[in-house]
Amino acid sequence: MNALEVRAALALAVVYVLRMLGLFMVMPVLAVAAMDFPDYSPLLVGLAVGGYGLTQAALQIPMGMLSDRWGRKPVILLGLSVFAIGSFIAAQADSLAWLLVGRVLQGAGAIAGAIMALATDVSRESQRAKVLAIIGIAIGFSFYLAVLLGPVIAQSWGLAGIFIITGVLAVACMPLIIWVVPTGEVLSSGDTLPQQGQLTRLIFSSQLWRLNVSVMLLHMMITLLFVQLPVTLLHFEMTLDSHWTLYLPVLGASIVGLIIMMGAARGRTPKSLLLAGVVMMAGAFALLSMQDHAWWIVVVAVILFFTGFNYLEANFPALVSSIAPAGEKGTAMGIYASFQFFGAFLGGVISGFITDIWSAELAYLIGAIVAVLWLGVLFGLREVSRVKRVMMNAQFTEADSNPLTQSLKTVPGVLEVTLRPEEGAVYMKVSREFDATRARQVLSGPHPAG
């Protein structure tokens, strides 16, 4: 990567980390800290933990499309502003109802698609995967950091302190977007952003819907866990500021488990390991649902949960990328992200509602039952080989499309071709044997009329 691409990748990664920290830091804290509010109820706690997911799910695709019209930076700055306002409202909240308003506004700053599109705009095709990988690593890092920092910050500055820090960090991201991240030419790439005409077809795709439902259930479960787990830890006389002493070794052990599972996969994504990840999460909830669980049971359960969660979270996006048709990855990922965030909202509602009326143990048991049902969804998923996606620019007409498609399919390694004459773009799914030089020769040569 050149200096411009490194600068863009690091700056956008920092923006992503600081923003996601604000969303995630309250997750291991809120269920305990909310007990001080006069309108406390488990249902409102669940809504406050997962409330951001509702607006994220609703606005993820529209905000991405809007960045094509308004430009990436204006949409990102708008999203950061809304996110910061929501953070400051939550910081001043004297009731759970107002805190919920702040969380919903935080979620309205749905800028993930615009950030990824800006990263695409300012990087060369040959380096784009590296830039996006740096941002992807930052997203995973932000979650682990948030889980560890949240309880410590809450102990020192309270719940309001977390939201104030979150709002300040969002504002601090704005100069990075304005002055540090370069402004590139807007590339309306079907492999980067959602396209409206593709939505219905991809939502009902026979394989993609299984992954969309799976990521919804995955994030439903992690929200369900964090509505319940901090309160469970109080039963073992663990104060909020000491919760990190459980999370740190548990996350470390789960990362070791993830590495072992990745090694067993050998660069593929076998269905057996996906099912194993779900079984681990089902087992974790089953253990936590026991009425009189010992400390070691809680530790084992949380390690099992995060090992399964980490593996599925890391592999589902790669599967979406492999399955989505050439030139339609942006739409597929936009739908996937919407289901993902809606799952967080659903987890908060279900967990809070069940705890409000019945008990935390039943909420855990519901998680185990849902995970068992989830296995049926994944059983119908076909195993696919991971593929690389390539976009090349070329000048051609609608009449050229059929012969050009046939010519490109003769190029070694080309698996699938989608032509967009209006964009001057050729999207391909390719294998390791892909001959890029030969593909460029085909595109630069004469195109016989179809």
Image (cartoon, rainbow, N blue to C red):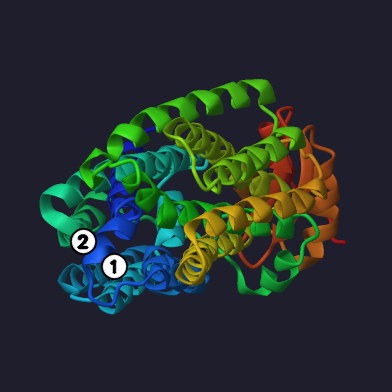
| Of callouts 1 and 2, the N-terminal one | 1
Q: Considering the image in quadrants, where does the C terminus appear?
A: bottom right
What residue is shown at x 43% (from left), y 44% (from top)? Answer: 123
Q: Foreground: 332 or 396?
A: 332
Res. 83 mark:
1
Q: Is 295 in front, or is 146?
A: 295
Residue type beneath disc 2: Phe
- Nearer the observer: mark 1 or 2; the answer is 2
Residue at 62% from the left image edge and 48% from the top image edge: 391
The image quadrant of residue 318 is top right
Left/right placement of residue 40 relative to residue 422 reads left
In the rendered view, would you say 361 is above or below 250?
below
Is the residue under label 2 in contact with that under label 1 (CB below 8 Å)?
no
**Residue 238 image point, x, y percent:** 28, 41
- Residue 331 sits above or below residue 407 on the image: below
Residue 149 visible in this rendered orientation of the protein: yes
- Relative depth, front residue between 243 and 392: 243
- The quadrant holding residue 433 is top right
Residue 212 shown left or right of residue 26 in the figure: right
Dot 2: within a 10 Å radius of its alpha carbon, few (fewer than 14), some, or many (20 or more) residues?
Answer: many
Amino acid at circle 1: Phe
Q: Mark 2 points at which residue?
A: 163
Q: Report the front residue among 407 and 13.
A: 13
Identify whether 86 is placed above or below 232. Answer: below
